[in-house]
Image (tube, grey):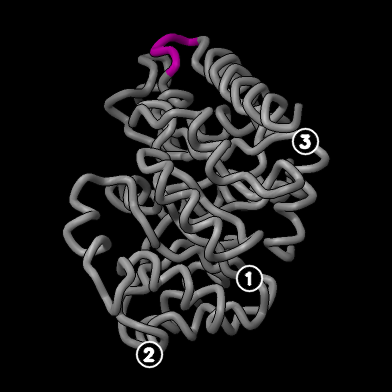
Amino acid sequence: MDFVAALRAAWRERDSLLCVGLDPDPARFPAALAGRSRVVFEFCREIVDATADLVCAFKPQIAYFAAQRAEDQLEALIGHIHARHPGVPVILDAKRGDIGSTAGMYAEEAFARYRADAVTVNPYMGRDSVEPYLGWRGKGVILLCRTSNPGGSDLQFLDVGGERLYEHVARLVADEWNVNGNCALVVGATFPAEIARVRALVGDMPLLVPGIGAQGGNIAATVMAGRTGDGAGLLLNSSRAILYASAGEDFAAAARRAAAATRDAINACRARREA
């Protein structure tokens, strides 16, 4: 699956900019799932099947699986998404960043072992640490740019030659690293002014935007700041607000309702912009 092509098709065909993050925390699972040997997979599978027609992508966070020794369940989950919901791209949220030889192994892990369609990468070690991912044609490389955490400003707002470091990263990725057209950037919903600045620097490059939902990012401000001329260009990620919409046996149905409400809220903002 070509990540960018699949993403554009999902935006269009599903009329959705919603990305559902899969951050499974067994402490928050419904009691009805207790004691199951593959509970992480089963919980996520139910969420996926309940929401797949409402989203443009899914984003499993690798740490939540690894902490439970559930990497095999992550492999099974991505396989399930590809088999049952073809056309929905899967982003492995790993935020990898290391020297070139090690980065090559991380790229192999993401794209060959897990068969993810895209992976999040930390670019702050420079191009040689990103190059191994860029060589996987058709696979998405989503680079951290302006992150949603408060401490991101410690480094990302540093002045480097008259511009902020995050601006330099955005320009570098757009102008020099995106040679195969498979790059995207992470920009947090908690900083709409920076979203607008990144959009101005990178044109129509996709932006993965965490921070709506539980983190409190404003949907309207995010859409206004980051959408492209065709009303797309964004993957607005929500995780906990959808995954844990109910602690009861109706958790999947509740997740669907929360996902539908979020998608509809995003689309209402898109419509106001177009009017």
In three-dimensional space, the C-alpha distance between marks 1 and 2, rounded to whole angstroms, equals 21 Å
Query: Residue 270: x, y in percent?
Result: 67, 31
> In percent of the image, x 60 and y 19: which residue is there?
256
Q: Is residue 247 magenta?
A: yes
Furthest residue toward front: 162
Instruction: Kindly indicate the quadrant of the structure image that contains residue 165.
Output: bottom left
Marks 1,2: beta carbons within 8 A: no
Query: Residue 98: x, y in percent?
Result: 31, 79
Instruction: Look at mark 3 in the image and give the residue it sits on.
Output: 14
**In the rendered view, does 161 fall on the left or right side of 46?**
left
> In percent of the image, x 38 and y 49: which residue is there?
70
Disc 2 residue type?
Ser
In three-dimensional space, the C-alpha distance between marks 1 and 3, rounded to whole angstroms, equals 21 Å
Instruction: Look at mark 2 in the image and give the residue it sits on.
Output: 101
Please tell me which of labels 1 and 3 falls first in the chain: 3
Q: Nearer the viewer, mark 1 or mark 2?
A: 1
Q: Is residue 196 magenta?
A: no
> In percent of the image, x 63 and y 26: which residue is there?
269
